[in-house]
Amino acid sequence: MKEQYDVVIIGGGPGGYAAALYCVRAGLDTLVLEKLSAGGQMATTTQVDNYPGFDEGIDGFELAEKMQRGAERFGAVTEYAEVTALDLNASPKRITTSAGTVLAKAVILATGASPRLLGVPNEEAMRGHGVSYCATCDGMFFRNKTVVVAGGGNSAAEDALALSKICKKVYLVHRRDTLRATQSYLAPLQKASNLEFVWNKQIDRLLVDNQQLTGIGMTDRVTGETSELSCDGLFVAVGRVPDTALVKEQVALDEQGYIIADETTRTSVPGVFVVGDARTKPMRQIITAAADGATASKFVEEYLQSLE
Ligand code: NAP
């Protein structure tokens, strides 16, 4: 990692690496800071079928590697480091990381989002002891076991379907009486003989024995009745929250914590741009994150020209 770059991109998901590809091809000295490995949330999906160009779909981790290599082929640099502080109003902008401090004329925020917690007591402590936020990553630990999937959106539907192929029994517990997930999930969910819907139940307790999850406690949202359900695993799929804590004092966020940006990807701070799931936008998908990355490069270039 050098001392200074034209543009530093924080986050190596599809938005980050698409931005890197376009910036580096525009002749900008480009650094991607990634804390773990390329891909972000995409890397935890085994089968991506809605990113064009892959007629048989592609593994999310593999797609992430391809995106990274595609940007690095033209000279983008990746540094595996965690960003711990940012001064976005300084000129140049100052980024403090676990690998040292780096300066940038422009910054693209591509920090994405993380799973939302269910909000029950002990939840954090039970993570890895029966509670998981990633069916793709952890499903195999529950082969031939009984699991609960919490949620009613596309993620919950996708997780329940995937788990029904591995587990003995899957309960899809939703707090309402219909799914929010797109129609296309419904028929395959209904066809899975080991999958059972549990409607109108709010999970409010984790049942634990010897530091291991043994079940969940629920309250019926219509009758108020409480009940328990034994299970080996709980997969929480109740949405996501943007990873914007680092910048919350410096750029304008909406009430849910997403960084406010229009189609130009500009934030409230000159020279700071945002792409992908961390920003305000109507649809959070790999393809829309990648599109943001391309768009950002155009406005980064325009900003850098204005500095000359
Ligand atoms: P989501 O669409 O926001 O759905 C979250 C679900 O969790 C909702 O049904 C919500 O219930 C429920 N929920 C939220 N907080 C809860 C709590 N504390 N306790 C119990 N239930 C709670 O989230 P998502 O499914 O993660 O999807 C996020 C985005 O990614 C969406 O835009 C989705 O379309 C996209 N996605 C796309 C694909 C795909 O295209 N293949 C796959 C996965 C995700 P209510 O309905 O009552 O609010």
Image (cartoon, rainbow, N blue to C red):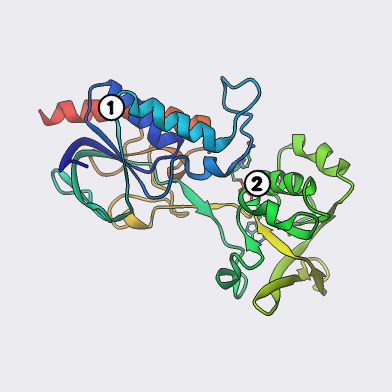
Q: Categorize mark 2 by other alpha carbons within 10 Å: few (<14), some (14-19), many (20+).
A: many
Residue 68 vs residue 124, the one in the foreground: 68
Residue 281 vertical position relative to residue 100 in the rendered view, above or below: above
The crowd level at tag 1 (other Cα within 10 Å; few <14, some 14-19, many 20+) is: some
Q: Quadrant of the N terminus?
A: top left
Three-letter amino acid code of the residue under disc 2:
Ser
Q: Is mark 2 within 8 Å of ligand 1?
A: yes
Q: Residue farthest to the right?
A: 193
Count of residue discs: 2
- Marks 2 and 1, how far apart in space? 35 Å
> From this viewpoint, is residue 285 visible?
no
- Residue 164 is situated, as x and y percent measured from the top left of the image, at 79, 48
- Element under disc 1: loop
Q: Quadrant of residue 50?
A: top right
What mark, if any, has residue 75 been given in the picture?
A: 1
Viewer-side residue, 260 vs 298: 298
Q: Amino acid at mark 1?
A: Gly
Q: Give the residue at mark 2.
A: 155
The image shows residue 172, relative to residue 50, as above or below, that is below
* Residue 256 seen: yes
Q: Is residue 47 left or right of residue 40?
A: right
Residue under the image location 83 percent in, 55 percent down = 168
Q: Nearer the viewer, mark 2 or mark 1?
A: 1
Q: Position of residue 99 (x, y in %)?
A: 25, 53
Residue located farthest toward the bottom when viewing the structure as drawn: 210
The quarter of the displayed image where residue 262 is located: top left
What's the residue at 76%, 44% (across, down)?
161
Q: In the picture shown, does residue 124 fall above or below 272?
A: below
